[in-house]
Amino acid sequence: MSEVWKPSVTVAAIIEKDGRFLLVEEETSDGIRLNQPAGHLDPNETLIEAVARETQEEAAYEFSPTALVGLYMSTYLSSRTNKEVTYLRFAFCGELGRALDQPLDEGILRTVWMTREEMLACEERHRSPLVLRCVDDYLAGRRAPLSMIYTHSSVIGAQRD
């Protein structure tokens, strides 16, 4: 029997304040990289819950998503396993809440606020090409209402938005 292919589902928060975007500087297997607050969808979690949680864990801010900026599919060769990995990234914009008094997630070195031009100037340090692509889509005004996302789980036993 062959192995079943499954993409990894991730979420990312595109957060803009005064012309600057919130990024995290993180340790990766490829060195120190810049990314939006982002991470994997956990079991029994909605996409909305996931992006709020990841922003809290990685950037120590509350975040309330208001729109879907885009859905992105990308394939990479894992430097760890030397196998192809496919990611489906759901990028959200929204309202930044209060700063939280808590440590950043393991592997996150610090948060930084950068303009698009500053991000472009250090593109080689981005975790993936999606970092700048998501910001460009946000700046282009791409938005889909959260009502486009429907979640149903018979495991949880309830329908959720």
Image: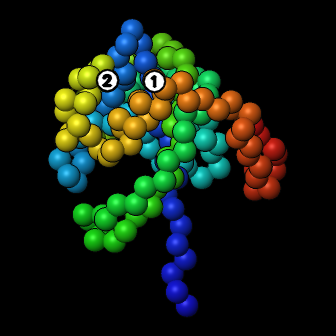
For badge 2, the amino acid type reads Arg
Badge 1 crowding class, 10 Å Cα cut-off, few under 14, some 14 to 19, many 20 or more, is few
Label 2 secondary element? helix
Q: Residue at x 51, y 37 (%)?
A: 91
Badge 2 crowding class, 10 Å Cα cut-off, few under 14, some 14 to 19, many 20 or more, is some
For badge 1, the amino acid type reads Leu
Work out whether residue 21 can be spotted. Answer: yes
On residue 40, the disc is none
Q: Where is residue 159 in the image (x, y as percent from the top left)?
A: 81, 44
Assign the N terminus to one quadrant of the image: bottom right
Picture quadrant where residue 71 is located: top right
Q: Is residue 42 above or below residue 38?
A: below
Q: Where is residue 31 in the image (x, y as percent from the top left)?
A: 17, 47
141, 156: nearer the viewer: 141
Q: Position of residue 146 (x, y in %)?
A: 68, 32
Assign the C terminus to one quadrant of the image: top right
44, 89: nearer the viewer: 89
Q: Residue at x 74, y 33 (%)?
A: 147
The answer to whether residue 30 is left or right of residue 53 is left
Instruction: Specify how the rendered protein is coloured.
Output: rainbow
Work out whether residue 109 can be spotted. Answer: no
31, 84: nearer the viewer: 84
- Give the residue at the far bottom of this rendering: 1
Disc 2 to disc 1: CB gap under 8 Å: yes
To which residue does mark 2 refer?
116
To which residue does mark 1 refer?
139
The answer to whether residue 161 is left or right of residue 120 is right
Label 1 secondary element? helix
Q: Position of residue 113 (x, y in %)?
A: 30, 19
Dot 2 or dot 1: first in sequence order is: 2
